[in-house]
Image (tube, rainbow, N blue to C red):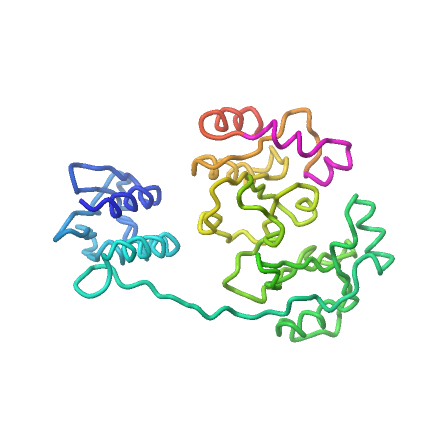
Amino acid sequence: MLHIDSKYIGLVSARLAKFKRTKDNLYNFRCPFCGDSKKNKNKTRGYLFQKKGDFIFKCHNCGASKGFSTFIKEIDPTLHSQYTMERYKSGLTGKGRFTEEPTFTFKKPVFKKKVDLPLASEDPQSRIYLKKRGLDPDKFYYADRFKHFCNKHKPTFEDTKFDHPRIVIPMYDSDRSLIGFQGRSLDPSQKPKYLTIMLSEESPKLYGLDTINEEEPIYIVEGPFDSTLVENSVAMCGSDVDIRSLGWSNYIWVFDNEPRNRENINRVSRVIDNGDKVVLWPQNIVEKDINDMFLGGQNIKTLLESNTYSGLEAKLKLQSWKRI
């Protein structure tokens, strides 16, 4: 049995209901393509078995049959890319193999490196708003006509008639190339509060990639403003970021302090189940997010370091933290 296949069967098993190893080189689970049976949730007619040194998937309900490489690609494309690369490095791809050669793309897109806008500190309304939140207005920009600014970089808005001002939060990659930006409304009635525009669709929707040290623990917080208050951190600017694909070895999730928000609790639970580290706030903290905690006089660094959990300890702490 190939060590690489064994490794990736273990990784993809988390996505397969009723997964179990029945004997050497044979795995059984509910078919992820047909669902096996809506009436009987215990039906498991999907199998992975070894054939000529490679693994094959077969469902005895819908009849689906495919090589393990195709199977994992349809279940988890990101994991498939990692699998293909490992097979390639071991000389197990290409002609006569079940796994195709990986595709290499060497051309790197070039983006505008600077935001052609005044700093937020130069606009009275933006400066006052950011300083009231304890934030540095020189880290952000200001667009008096946000839609026009967006359309200069990427055609986004067909109608710019009702344009409006926003604080612009730039997103750079590790090479300091502009990959996108967020616009934060200054008018409370202006919805949505945040608008995210990506110039590179392949880049992760993260703020702070240009400032982190990957050799140190990386905190993943909920918003760019919070990120400026946390050393060595990035901020999620979209919910579809695959953190594992970035190859970081040490990262810590920091969600808002919302113990009554079911969606937030589910997000915390998922990262714990994935084996990741997470910050779970103590009961004496009443503020919702890092910015409010900072304004309330909390020492953010100490608070994060003393409330980081993982594994069983995190699961037990989650039970005492949540309020539903």
Instruction: Please name the residue shown 85% across and 56% down the image.
Output: 125
The x, y position of residue 42, in whole percent, is 25, 38
| Nearer to me, 143 or 30 | 143
The x, y position of residue 324, in whole percent, is 56, 30
Q: How many marks?
A: 0
Q: Please, is residue 303 above or below residue 264 in the view?
A: above
| Nearer to me, 106 or 264 | 106
Q: Is residue 295 shown in magenta?
A: yes
Q: Is residue 70 left or right of residue 265?
A: left
The x, y position of residue 299, in whole percent, is 72, 31
Q: Please, is residue 269 above or below residue 146 in the view?
A: above
| Nearer to me, 37 or 268 | 268
Instruction: Please name the residue shown 58% across and 50% down the image.
Output: 236
The x, y position of residue 161, in whole percent, is 74, 74
Q: Please, is residue 265 above or below residue 201 in the view?
A: above
Q: Is residue 220 left or right of residue 1?
A: right
Question: Can you tell which quarter of the image residue 187 is in?
Answer: bottom right
Q: What segment is highlighted magenta in the picture?
A: 289-308
Instruction: Please name the residue shown 72% across and 35% down the image.
Output: 293
Q: Is residue 77 left or right of residue 314?
A: left
Q: Is residue 271 shown in magenta?
A: no
Q: Residue furthest left?
A: 52
Q: Main secondary structure of the magenta part?
A: helix
Which quadrant holds the N terminus? top left
Question: Can you tell which quarter of the image residue 41 is in?
Answer: top left
Question: Can you tell which quarter of the image residue 226 is in?
Answer: top right
